[in-house]
Image (tube, helix red, strand yellow):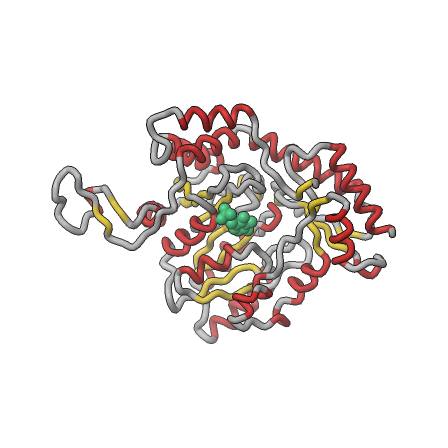
Amino acid sequence: MIPYGRQNISDEDIDAVIEVLKSDFITQGPIVPLFEEKISKYCSSKYALAMNSATSALHIACLALDVGPGDYVWTSAVSFVATANCALYCGAKIDFIDIDEDFYNLSIEKLENKLQKSKKTNTLPKVLIVVHLTGQPIDMERIHLLSKEYGFRVIEDASHAIGAKYKKELIGNCKYSDCVVFSFHPVKIITTGEGGMLLTNNSVVFDKANKLRTHGITKKNDDFVNQSHGPWYYEQNELGFNYRMTDIQAALGISQLNRIDNFIKRRKELAKSYNSSLKDFPVIIPKQHVTTESSWHLYVIRLDIVKIKKTHKEIFEFLRSSGIGVQIHYIPIILHPYYERLKFNKNEFPNSMKYYKEAISLPIYASLSDEEQREVVEVLKKALDS
Ligand SMILES: *Cc1c(COP(=O)(O)O)cnc(C)c1O
């Protein structure tokens, strides 16, 4: 099976991990801070905090922005469930924005309409979580302007988008948002096994997130509520979590980051090659906005259903049974039973529902060979022709 995504592990990666295993510290040693420094330098953010997943980083980002009971968090109707779950972990209410037909990120027009309506009923969101779906950045300048006009904070779920560029600058610089979150799950651009990162330029957000990542414990004199009892003293003065990354993972992350430019270059090549191979197929290929550069985490095609004799499901099944590990990113969040219980109205998300009936993610990852890609295209042609 050719999967839709997979990790790329080199001998250098393996050596880097072994070196940590032989060292004094396998967690909470010197490598996690080094990884954070390298990521924040690469992205031009002031701060970076490594965590054990992007899900944890999203949770902490919400808490650091004071999301709590009574607050609203809004996000895109089409994303991985973790993008929405983080708001519910904080006791807040979640609501969704339909996607844009062309780029599959949340529709900024629909966001604007919803903001206007919510202003009248005093139900404006405290935080908006935008997702750079597939690695295509959303128009962050417009999001930033709306955040100023309506007074909400912004988290970028950039789980797909490390290495992507918005207006010539890498995603992660936090220029138009309060926090950016990356995922280092094995299918993503670079991996640490499980892992994530929270980036911010705001020292208050950083301090809060830093403490929440490790139980709400502080070892800094200035942060103590009580008098220190002695040199052993540390203090828990908030309710936090153990969301730390290990040095073993961070060593893999640093080694992976050394190759990120090659990874992105290869993904761009593969996308370009799909674009030209599929141009006469009855499918809609991904669009690329002139002001952005995708990291090509995913290559999503949409079937032109009226021109095809088979159904979406039949095409999908044909590909899977022919050894092509296609996937769908994503089932609209409101269709999951847990979210169905929260009673959202499907009719508010026509673009998301249509997208879900047409989208298929084709294999794309740095180590996908030209030959494997040709096989994907051939099988897809067969599926669409017959
Ligand atoms: C992968 C992913 C996450 C969760 O990442 P983990 O590191 O697995 O917790 C969150 N949001 C999006 C959009 C993702 O693709």
State the count of labels.
Answer: 0
Q: Position of residue 7 (x, y in %)?
A: 58, 36
**Residue furthest right in the image:** 386
Residue at position x 64%, y 72% from top?
347
Residue at (69%, 48%) from the top-left corner? 326
Q: Is residue 151 visible?
A: no
Q: Quadrant of residue 114?
A: bottom right
Where does residue 301 sit, x and y in percent of width and height? 72, 50
Please tell me whether residue 172 is drawn above or below residue 306 in the rendered image. Answer: above
Residue at image point 54% right, 37% down = 190
Q: Nearer the viewer, residue 58 or 319?
A: 319
Please tell me in which quadrant of the rendered image residue 277 appears. Answer: top right
Q: Tell me: residue 221, above or below residue 26.
A: below
Side of 95 where 352 appears, left or right: right
Which quadrant is the N terminus positioned in? top right
> Residue at the bottom extreme?
121
Can residue 55 be seen here? The reply is yes
Residue 55 % position (x, y): 47, 51
Q: Is residue 287 left or right of residue 94?
A: right
Q: Position of residue 133 (x, y in %)?
A: 60, 51
Q: Residue at x 63, y 53 (%)?
A: 329
The front one of 157 and 54 is 54
